[in-house]
Amino acid sequence: LLNWKISCKMYKILNKTYTKLPTEDMEQEELVKWLIKNNYFFFATKNENNQSFNNRLVAIKIEAKAKARGKIKGTPDLCIFTDNKIVFMELKRQKPILKSGKLGKPTNDATKEQLEFLAKVNDYKYAYACVAWGCDDAVRILKGSF
């Protein structure tokens, strides 16, 4: 039993323990709860087209309409207002824990378009853009100085 506890990978989100790597959705839901609890003004961007799973023709039409209305590929998941900056945050899953106990490579890197968007945002003095690897990393970034 002792060996099982040592070899079992344990993941955490805001002190909640998980035996499996949490999904990106789980990470974002916990971060949103934390933002609300800590009185941040923020909004989530919806840059996905779920219709692509159901009907390709409908998805193409929806995507064309969204682009005509200003949808930009690579828009980060969250826009968070702090006292001194507007933070554009792309949230990814936390990095997996390897058998050695060290952190592995991320399971989902930021896309080229996401990195380009973040770089453009960082050209503005009043904004900060970043990739956070899980909810806890996002909280650490928000508590730190930009």
Image (tube, rainbow, N blue to C red):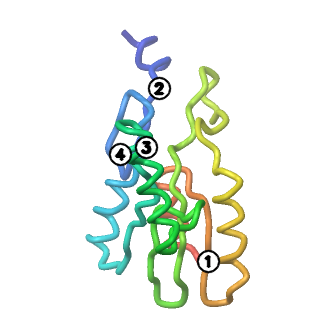
Gap in angstroms between the C-alphas marked 3 and 4: 30 Å
Residue 129 or 100: which is nearer the viewer? 129
Q: Earlier in the sequence, mark 2 or mark 3?
A: 2
> Looking at the picture, which amino acid does disc 2 mark?
Lys
Say which element carries label 4.
Answer: helix
Question: Which class describes the residues within 10 Å of circle 4: few (<14), some (14-19), or many (20+)?
Answer: some
Q: Earlier in the sequence, mark 3 or mark 4?
A: 4
Q: Which mark is residue 128?
A: 1
User: Is residue 35 rendered to the left or right of residue 115?
Assistant: left
Q: What residue would you read off at disc 4?
A: 26
The residue mark sitting in front, 3 or 1, is 3
Q: Earlier in the sequence, mark 1 or mark 2?
A: 2
Gap in angstroms between the C-alphas marked 3 and 1: 37 Å
> Looking at the picture, which amino acid does disc 4 mark?
Met
Q: Residue 84: give x, y in percent of width and height.
A: 53, 90
> Looking at the picture, which amino acid does disc 1 mark?
Tyr
Question: Which class describes the residues within 10 Å of circle 3: few (<14), some (14-19), or many (20+)?
Answer: few
Q: Residue 73: give x, y in percent of width and height.
A: 59, 61
Q: What residue would you read off at disc 2?
A: 9
Say which element carries label 1.
Answer: strand
> Looking at the picture, which amino acid does disc 3 mark?
Leu
In the displayed structure, 39 sits above or below 113; it is below
Q: Residue 109: give x, y in percent of width and height.
A: 64, 45
In the displayed structure, 50 sits above or below 6; it is below
Which residue is depicted at the point 38% across and 47% down? 58
Q: Are marks 1 and 2 in contact (CB under 8 Å)?
A: no
Which residue is depicted at the point 51% across and 74% down? 70
